[in-house]
Image: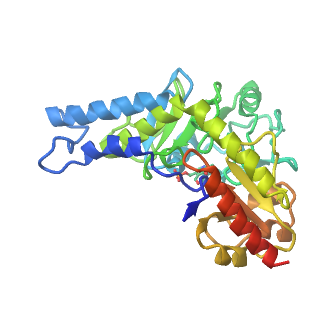
């Protein structure tokens, strides 16, 4: 199976897996301690968690702290819900192309939600229209469907001028592009940067006040109760360390793949900006393409339909609609994602199979 779905999840880095193993030890080992216990086993596990925290923090700006969560979805819920005082119904603003973790959560807060439009290239304006009493603005760093890289620092600066907090969903950008230095909160997911599934993080700038959304034992600075998994933290930490150290090499590799993919898929139209884009994302469309049939015909390449939303409801993607595609165009789109472990030979073979199956439909 050729894996071309790096925006859905990334393979676990072997180094991250290795780092996790000792914290999965059974009774014979010393790695199963509760990181919140005061004895030696607990302190060893706690040290592993703190090392992981430092490594994840290295992907974030200075001047804040990392709170581990069960996913980036939970981190974004903590950011949005945790910064909303009871009864505060001042407006929040979110981009039209946010992930459901932001869009649905913003709508659940109870106040007005202003949706910031994107242009045909999939870009939010650097100074989007914000109503004067907006209290929070959330714009993602890299879009998960079309890969567009948003001008998040300019938007954060604009939000700050009217006194709003800026939350950045950096799930698809962390470890690939520089973090927005002026955000108040940044959400990251381990499994999008070659770490394990089941763990995410919210970076919170010093001085930002949050209320917990998960209460209990008071772990994670009182912001997220529940016993941490040292194995997941250690895997996340190692993945973050690698992403930090290999950022340039990873980007160079992706650039090589992108250039070749551009040649191989010359008969397709790219959805979203080619320039302001993470080049490990290829969202393509072809007039009249039946994507379900294509996916059935190309079973040994893992890629994604560009049109369906995550729930598999078959509704056209809100992102493709936001850039102006009609239903038919959105439904004839596919998403291919590649990264650190993809090879040129794999991209070539995937393209050959996808192109042959698409041509068969003509
Ligand atoms: N935000 C973006 C941009 C994503 O791509 C995803 C995952 O698809 C999420 C948030 C949610 O991340 P998690 O799977 O860690 O909950």
Q: Residue at x 44, y 30 (%)?
A: 55
- Where is residue 195, by image quadrant? top left
Q: Position of residue 289 (x, y in %)?
A: 81, 73
Instruction: In this rendered view, identify the residue nearer to me: 24 or 91.
Output: 24
Query: Which quadrant of the figure has residue 326?
Result: bottom right
Q: Is residue 201 left or right of residue 218?
A: right
* Rendered position, 58 above or below 345: above
Residue 216 visible, this angle: no
Q: Is residue 158 visible?
A: yes
Q: Is residue 148 left or right of residue 65?
A: right
Name the quadrant of the C terminus: bottom right
The residue furthest front is 345
Q: Nearer the viewer, residue 120 or 116?
A: 120
In the image, what residue occupies the spot 47% across and 39% down?
A: 211
Quadrant of the image containing the N terminus: bottom right
Give residue 63's position: percent from left, percent from top: 52, 20
**Extreme residue toward the left, this view:** 28
Q: Is residue 263 left or right of residue 175?
A: right
Across and down, in percent, residue 359 comes to 81, 73
């Amino acid at each position: 199976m050729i894996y071309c779905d790096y925006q859905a999840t990334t393979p676990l880095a072997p180094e991250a897996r290795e780092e996790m193993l000792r914290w999965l030890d059974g009774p014979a080992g010393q790695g199963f301690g509760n990181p919140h216990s005061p004895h030696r086993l607990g302190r060893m596990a706690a040290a592993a968690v703190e090392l992981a925290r430092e490594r994840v923090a290295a992907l974030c700006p200075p001047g804040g702290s990392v709170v581990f969560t069960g996913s980036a979805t939970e981190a974004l819920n903590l950011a949005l819900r945790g910064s909303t005082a009871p009864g505060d119904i001042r407006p929040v603003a979110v981009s039209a192309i946010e992930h459901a973790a932001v869009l649905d959560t913003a709508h659940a807060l109870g106040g007005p939600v202003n949706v910031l439009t994107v242009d045909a290239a999939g870009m939010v304006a650097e100074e989007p229209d914000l109503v004067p009493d907006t209290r929070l603005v959330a714009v993602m760093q890299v879009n998960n469907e079309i890969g567009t890289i948003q001008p998040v620092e300019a938007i954060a600066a604009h939000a700050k001028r009217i006194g709003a907090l800026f939350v950045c969903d950096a799930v698809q950008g962390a470890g690939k592009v520089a973090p927005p230095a002026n955000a108040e909160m940044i959400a990251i997911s381990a499994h999008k940067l070659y770490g394990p599934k089941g763990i995410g993080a919210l970076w919170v700038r010093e001085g930002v006040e949050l209320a917990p959304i998960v209460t209990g034992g008071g772990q994670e600075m009182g912001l997220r109760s529940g016993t941490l998994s040292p194995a997941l933290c250690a895997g996340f930490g190692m993945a973050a360390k690698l992403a930090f150290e290999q950022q340039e090499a990873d980007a160079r590799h992706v650039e090589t793949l992108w250039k070749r993919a551009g040649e191989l898929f010359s008969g397709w139209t790219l959805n979203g900006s080619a320039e302001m884009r993470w080049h490990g994302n290829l969202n393509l469309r072809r007039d009249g393409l039946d994507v379900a049939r294509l996916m059935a015909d190309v079973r040994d390449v893992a890629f994604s339909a560009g049109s369906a939303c995550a729930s598999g409801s078959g509704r056209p993607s809100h992102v493709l609609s936001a850039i102006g595609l009609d239903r038919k165009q959105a439904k004839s789109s596919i998403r291919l994602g590649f990264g650190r472990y993809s090879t040129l030979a794999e991209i070539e073979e995937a393209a050959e199979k996808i192109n042959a199956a698409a041509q068969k439909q003509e």
